[in-house]
Image (cartoon, coloured by chain):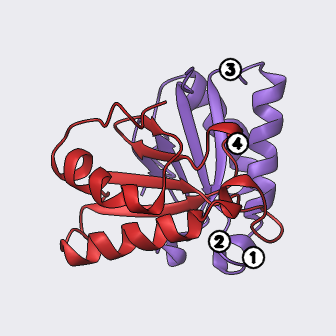
Chain colours: A red, B purple
Amino acid sequence: MNKPKTHIFVCTSSRVNGQSKGFCHSKEAGNIVENFLEEIRERDLGAEVFVSNTGCFSLCEKGPIVVVYPDNVWYGGVRPEDVEKIMDEHIEGGKVIKSLEL
Amino acid sequence: MNKPKTHIFVCTSSRVNGQSKGFCHSKEAGNIVENFLEEIRERDLGAEVFVSNTGCFSLCEKGPIVVVYPDNVWYGGVRPEDVEKIMDEHIEGGKVIKSLEL
């Protein structure tokens, strides 16, 4: 199969058997997911970059959380407006954003 | 922060704004998550191995899907009873299970 080159995981506090509830979800994590999807579409990176929403990472006090694999880079306190910067500097530029890194 | 050495993602068809619905969820993905949590607890690997449920990976026809990062190994058609084997051979043994790999 064609694996994505980069896989971005956004905590949306999605529960296995129920609705999304919790800290990251309340902090507009859904908008973070939407912004990633829009940036990936606009940059035509759909074949290389995949975004997934996830359940809780048990780091709620540092949320919203975004994790980039296989780089294994964890970002905290991410706002929807940080998505463009993450795409520019990390996903396309290959540089970890120290100010957001956990 | 202490990052997990291995991060296992299980598609539970979790939707950003709603309930888990869809193929993987209907295929007992919730039991796969539960089995991983139980194996990790029993093996005392909680500090090294983390499990997350996720939204759809757009590979529904190959589900249920389990992805292991940073290894970037994708497994398909995973059954709850495969979890012990994945823990033994891959997570603890470091060997990819070819029969399940996508």
Marks 4 and 3 share the same chain: no
Dot 3 and dot 2 residues touching (CB under 8 Å): no
Mark 3, chain letter? B
Q: Nearer the viewer, mark 4 or mark 1?
A: 4
Q: Which residue is mark 4?
A: A60
- Above-or-below relation of A99 to A6: above
- Residue B85 image offset from top left, x and y in percent: 66, 37
Q: Nearer the viewer, mark 1 or mark 3?
A: 3
Direction from residue B55 to residue B42 in the image, left or right = right
- Residue A84 image offset from top left, x and y in percent: 29, 60
Direction from residue B44 to residue A89 in the image, left or right = left
Ranked by sequence position, the earlier of labels 1 and 3 is 1
Q: CA distance from mark 3 to mark 2?
A: 26 Å
Q: Nearer the viewer, mark 4 or mark 3?
A: 4
Residue at left offset 28%, top offset 35%: A96
- Residue B21 image offset from top left, x and y in percent: 72, 80
Q: Which residue is mark 1?
A: B26
Disc sitting over residue B47 in the figure: 3
